[in-house]
Image: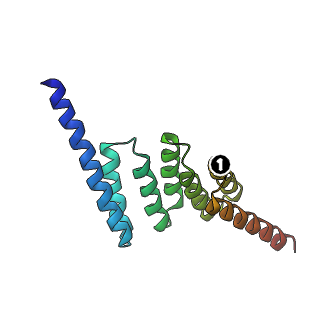
Amino acid sequence: MCFLLVYKLIFFDVQYTIVYTNIGYALYELKQFQEAVECYNEAIAINPKSDQCWNSKGNALYELKQFQGAVKCFNEAIAINPKFDQFWNNKGNALRNFKQHQEAVECYNEAIAIISKSDASRNNKDNQLLNINMQVVYYTN
């Protein structure tokens, strides 16, 4: 009996996590980013080990230009699943916009190392290196 009760609680927690996450996805697509963050917070409260929820919350915070908060979320996703290249790529994008250029390149390198065919990460790294070079030229002239 006790086992069945625990199973049901876990089942419902998983279901509620999925519901909140899916509502968050829908709100994100509607560009209602703050509301999406609130749904992801609910999902994370139920299942703090959901790397996808942390990543999705980071993406919504990124759209709200809350880059520091986005980086924290991507760090959580990476801590749970360090072998998913998109988390590293997303963190690199947030760091780039947070003006932490070298750290952004390091994240793109991590993403490229995970999946050597990661064109998005390679392009982001190349663009970031180009931006760094352009800034050096700008500051030296």
Identify which residue is drawn at 15% across, 24% down.
2
Q: Where does label 1 land, which residue?
A: 110
The image shows residue 64 at horizontal and vertical percentages of 46, 67
The quarter of the image holding the N terminus is top left
Name the quadrant containing residue 26.
bottom left
Name the quadrant containing residue 5.
top left
User: In the figure, 1 relative to 92: above or below?
Assistant: above
Identify which residue is drawn at 51% across, 41% down.
79
The image shows residue 30 at horizontal and vertical percentages of 35, 73
- Furthest toward the left, the residue is 1
- Does 138 sit left or right of 14 as displayed? right
The image shows residue 35 at horizontal and vertical percentages of 32, 64
- Does 39 sit left or right of 1 as displayed? right
Query: Helix, strand, or loop for circle 1?
Result: helix
Name the quadrant containing residue 13.
top left
Specify few, some or many for label 1: CA neighbours under 10 Å numbering under 14, 14-19, or 20 or more. Answer: many
Q: Which of 111/46 is in front?
A: 111
